Image (cartoon, rainbow, N blue to C red):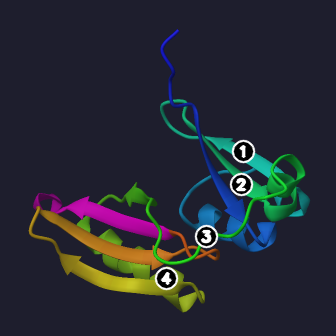
Amino acid sequence: MTPRLDMIGIVVRDMRQAVAFYRRLGLRFPEGSEAEQHVETTLAGGLRLALDSVDVVKSFDPTWTEPVGSPRMGLAFLVASPDDVDTTYAELVAAGYHGHKEPWDAFWGQRYAQLHDPDGNVVDLFAPLDAR
């Protein structure tokens, strides 16, 4: 069998904060997920996204240590329009999340912005500029 990407996992320090952040981006986690150590949601197309607490990860990999430096991977969320990039970015920053790069018109033809989730992972917001 050829391997198939089925799940993306994110290690989180605070499940409550992580679930709240990703819910604001439209992901659906079951009620009570904030109190769990592992939660999953199925994305459009069937790919799953999992949030695991540091304790869960250390339970099967006691040598795991938190990464340092800039992330090598990020998540990118398509929104409906360039104006929605600005609005979503502003709402998340106003809610206390860290804005990394304010919205701009990227040379590759998209309105783009970057934030950090509660654990410092890069989360991009984008929409095609021609959607204006």
How many labels were placed on the picture?
Answer: 4
Callout 3 secondary element: loop
* First along the sequence among labels 2 and 4: 2
Q: Amino acid at mark 3?
A: Pro
* Residue 30 seen in this snapshot: no
The stretch of residues the image draws in magenta is 122-132
Mark nearer the N terminus (4 vs 3): 3
- How far is the residue under mark 3 from the one under mark 2? 16 Å
Which residue is tagged 4? 91
Q: CA distance from mark 3 to mark 1?
A: 22 Å
Side of 47 relative to 33 (left or right): left
Q: Position of residue 38 (x, y in %)?
A: 81, 50
Mark number, residue 40: 1
Give the secondary structure at mark 2: strand
| Magenta stretch: includes residue 40 | no
Q: CA distance from mark 4 to mark 1?
A: 24 Å
Check contact, mark 1 vs mark 2: CB within 8 A. yes
Q: Earlier in the sequence, mark 3 or mark 2?
A: 2
Q: Is 86 placed above or below 60 here?
A: below
Residue beneath disc 2: 51
